[in-house]
Image (cartoon, rainbow, N blue to C red):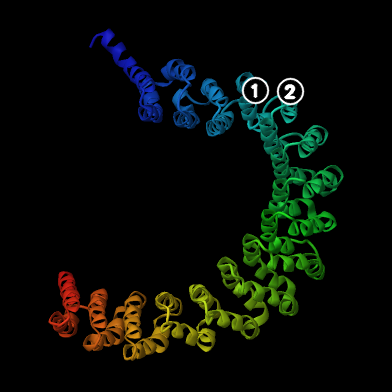
Amino acid sequence: MTATDSANEALYPIAVLIDELRNEDVQLRLNSVKKLSTIALALGVERTRTELIPFLTDTIYDEDEVLLTLAEQLGTFIPLVGGDQFAHVLLPPLESLATVEETVVRDKAVESLRKLAASHSPADLEAHFVPLVRRLANGDWFTSRTSACGLFSVCYERVGAAVKQQLRQHFSNLCTDDTPMVRRAAAGKIGELAQVVEPEFVRSELLPMFKQLMADEQDSVRLLAVESAVILARLLGPEDTDKLMMKSLRSAVDDKSWRVRYMVADKLTELQSALGAELTQRYLVEAFQALLKDPEAEVRAVSASKVRDFCVNLEASEAERTNIALNSILPAVKDLAGDANQHVKSALASVVMGLSPLLGKEHTVEQLLPLFLTQLKDECPEVRLNIISNLEAVNSVIGIKQLSMSLLPAIVELAEDSKWRVRLAIIQYMPLLASQLGSQFFDEKLNQLCMGWLVDHVFAIREAAVLNLRKLVEAFGSDWALSTVIPKVAELAVDTNYLHRMVCLFCVTELNSACPPDMVRAHLLPIVLKMASDTVPNVRFKVAQTLQQLAASFDAEVFEQQVKPCLDSLAGDADIDVQFFACEALEAIREKF
């Protein structure tokens, strides 16, 4: 091979890449970018640094999907350019990507730059990375300034005091930028920066920036500042937070924008942890009351979801905590139980049962049970489900006897409602309820109800009741099925109403998957075989279909001695549909054996 041939071969990968990256087909360009690591390996580290990376830097103009993949790829390129000492050569293309218009591309470029920062030595940070941050922070377009906000914290700790001072000044400028998007990015990152800045500068420089952001005219800036407030409060401690931050936080609770109030409510338990017991009782209890009564449903909903955690996390004696919950929180909670918005009621229903262990038996019976009853009868299915899903918490406090006297009558009332959709909703919750109450209690109070649904006049109810039966057997076991369920199924087999006899066969099909094969052969199969002589053709062809479903539970001997004679008889039935399904079942079962 000549020297010219060797040179041409060495240039081939980059030539192919250039061709593909300039191709009109977006998918081809995307595939080429995805193969960058392979191309870099073929080129070697030196040519990747001197040829591939400069080429990529000069050709960043493409579809967003291609640029997104490129930004992601470059974040993993350090081994391909020769290791950490050459990490800085990857900065130019990522700097360009951090200035593009599409947000997801910029975010991915910033993510890759943050990874690369960790591979820079302190000297390289000051020589290469900090100048990049400075250029982005001073960029003409808001896109570059927005990206810069996410890079300060990753380089701050490992640079000299003079550079740190410059970085703080640049970040301060971004906090007062003319463009709301830049201030929003700064508000979202100020907490992260505070974690690496020296405590004295957090108080003297970052806190004034934070207060300015909390008072910003744009609600999107203020709400992100609230998110950073949690980090700042943890860093400062309760005493300094009270002096330096509480005024801003209290103003956020009453903010004119519901989005800001929503963020306060969402971060309430985190703020509670950061502020400590004294400040929580002095400020947050009152703030929480206001948020629970907020005019916006979204704020009330997220506040309602925090009720249990807020009360449990109160750092006070048991008596004090119970007192706060009863006198300050519970009145607002009772109002929410009748809220016009179903999302508010649903959020409350998912957590309110958790107050029972906190309040104790007496207060649960007096204060919470009426609330549970109200929500259990709510027209919204999700509210009812959330209450039933959490009955266990109440059961552990007040006991099964009290629970049966109070809540179960309401459940039974709903189960017998004249509207079939209400009955259907209760059936769907029954397995969950059964698993929480146990088989003994279930048999005493609810078993008759479940069996009654099997003969409901609405087909959808009968169908749901059959599925419910299988789930109950899965929860309570095959012994329970043998003593409780199978006798009822056997009764349905001789019911005068053919629709009820059909339900019997539906039950057998469902129970087949929940019961062991020996139980199916000994108890369910005889029921089906006896029904083969039913006077109604629909029942007879359902027998054929059911036998086909049961095939997995019996062996060749059972098939030959019991099942095949039955199906042969049905195959000669006078009804053409019965003949069809019997022949189909015979053919399917023969294939199995």
Q: Provide residue 241's location: percent of width, then percent of height.
A: 82, 45
Residue at x 73% of width, y 76% of height: 360
- Specify whether 573 is left or right of 492: left
From the viewer's side, name the closer residue of 214 and 179. Answer: 179
Question: How far across and how far down the image is residue 512, in percent?
Answer: 32, 77
Element class at badge 1: helix
Residue at the (45%, 24%) spot, across then down = 62
Left-right relation of 590 to 263: left
Residue 49 or 15: which is nearer the viewer? 15
Image-quadrant location for residue 196 = top right
Q: Residues within 10 Å of mark 2 (few under 14, many from 20)?
A: few
Element at badge 2? helix
Amino acid found under the numbered disc labelled 2: Gln
Per the image, the residue denoted by label 2 is 166
Amino acid at pointer 1: Val
Q: Is residue 157 visible?
A: no
* Image coordinates for residue 493, horizontal then vertical, percent: 32, 88
Query: Eyeballing the image, is 177 above or below 12?
Result: below
Residue pictured at 30% horizontal, 84% vertical: 524
Disc sitting over residue 130 in the figure: 1
Instruction: Determine the CA span between mark 1 and mark 2.
Output: 10 Å
Decide: marks 1, 2 in contact (CB < 8 A)? Answer: yes
